[in-house]
Image (spheres, rainbow, N blue to C red):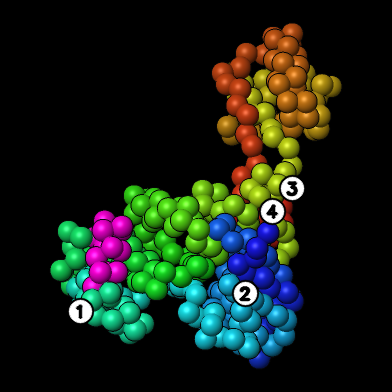
């Protein structure tokens, strides 16, 4: 499979801080890699190295088939980058922003205007195309910023926390736009602290901590690292929790846990639906009424806690 991004052993140090300590990444063409990690983990530094904005101290990386250190101009011709804040000129209109970028990229004035029109339509900005960008909402500015990254039709797109500060509707609109780009064959590397964003967009996820990739895989593969699915049982009367624990313990795949405040007993589902049936029979035999049975699957936040010892939030 062709790799659009390939990095091996990337290292970068800022004085007494080792920002990257041997980062390895492989991103197949036409896919989305979500790069997750707590603040200071090395996500943005990785993006800056891969986009030629920062020279690594060690290691090797290629983007779109070109070396980021030895062939930076070739890399830049083939990538787009959207940082954490929209990099558009508020004094120019949306149309002027995109046309100017096209002219600076030597598309020619006519081709730049045509490309701007295409992108304004694609990102639902035609109605505001001739308004100054400073009058745009946060979501509109982010869409304009993403459009600006695509003027040169890059094959690889880097998005560094692109939806920070956006409301849920604007965030979903941007997610849809990214998915459409990937359907057209664009490769995306996405850094984010929104776990639902990575869950929705990414084909694979790499978890970064301490300047290293500590886990990588699909969402399901990573979630399995956080443990099995669990069955949450809400009892009708909280004072029956001790009896519920005693009734469930013999047939459970692991030690049941109780939440006295919520009146919930949680136990691992070692045998899937068979475990649910066993639990139901045990509680009915013990005469313990329940109000709810719910299967809870591990989340990416559970993965974070398992891998890094802290919540992503």
- The answer for how far apart the CA atoms under marks 3 and 2 are is 33 Å
Category of crowding for the residue at label 1, using alpha-carbon neighbours closer than 10 angstroms: few (below 14), some (14–19), many (at least 20): few
Image quadrant in which the N terminus is located: bottom right
Q: Evaluate whether residue 46 shows in this view.
A: no
Left or right: 203 in relation to 98 = right
Q: Which residue shows up at 75% across the image and 22% down it?
A: 275
Q: Earlier in the sequence, mark 3 or mark 2?
A: 2
Q: Quadrant of the C terminus?
A: bottom right
Q: What residue is disc 3 on?
A: 225
Magenta span covers which residues?
113-125
Return the residue at label 1. 91
Please say whether residue 120 is one of the residues in the magenta stretch.
yes
Count residues near mark 4 (Cα–Cα under 10 Å), then give few for <14, some for 14-19, many for 20+: some
The secondary structure that dominates the magenta segment is helix
| Residue in front for this viewpoint, 233 or 46 | 46
Q: Are marks 3 and 2 in contact (CB under 8 Å)?
A: no
Label 4, label 1: how far apart the Cα atoms are? 43 Å
- Report the residue marked by disc 4: 217
Q: Give the foreground label among 4 and 3.
A: 4
Query: Relative to residue 190, is residue 246 depicted above or below?
Result: above
**Label 3, residues with CA under 10 Å away: few <14, some 14-19, many ≥20:** some
Q: Which is more toward the observer, 105 or 46?
A: 105
Q: In this image, 141 relative to 191: left or right?
A: left
Residue at image mark 2: 65
């Amino acid at each position: 499979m062709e790799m659009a991004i390939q990095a091996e052993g990337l290292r970068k140090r800022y004085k007494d801080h080792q920002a990257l300590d041997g980062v390895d990444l492989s991103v197949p063409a036409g896919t989305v890699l979500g790069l997750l990690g707590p603040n200071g983990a090395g996500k943005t530094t990785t993006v800056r190295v891969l986009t030629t904005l920062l020279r690594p101290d060690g290691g090797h990386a290629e983007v779109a088939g070109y070396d980021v250190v030895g062939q930076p101009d070739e890399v830049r011709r083939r990538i787009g980058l959207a940082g954490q804040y929209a990099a558009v000129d508020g004094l120019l209109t949306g149309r002027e922003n995109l046309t100017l970028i096209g002219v600076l990229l030597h598309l020619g004035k006519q081709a730049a205007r045509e490309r701007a029109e295409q992108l304004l339509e694609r990102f639902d900005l035609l109605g505001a195309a001739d308004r100054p960008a400073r009058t745009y909402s946060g979501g509109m500015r982010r869409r304009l910023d993403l459009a600006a990254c695509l003027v040169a039709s890059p094959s690889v797109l880097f998005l560094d926390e692109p939806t920070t500060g956006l409301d849920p509707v604007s965030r979903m609109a941007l997610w849809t736009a990214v998915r459409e780009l990937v359907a057209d064959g664009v490769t995306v590397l996405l850094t984010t602290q929104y776990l639902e964003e990575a869950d929705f967009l990414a084909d694979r996820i790499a978890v970064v901590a301490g300047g290293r990739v500590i886990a990588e895989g699909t969402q399901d593969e990573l979630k399995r690292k956080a443990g099995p699915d669990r069955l949450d049982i809400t009892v009708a009367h909280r004072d029956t929790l001790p009896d519920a624990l005693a009734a469930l313990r013999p047939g459970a795949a692991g030690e049941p846990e109780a939440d006295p405040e919520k009146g919930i007993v949680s136990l691992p589902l070692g045998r899937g639906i068979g475990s649910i049936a066993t639990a139901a029979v045990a509680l009915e035999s013990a005469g313990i009424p329940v109000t709810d049975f719910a299967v809870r699957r591990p989340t990416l936040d559970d993965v974070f806690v398992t891998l890094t010892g802290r919540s992503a939030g």
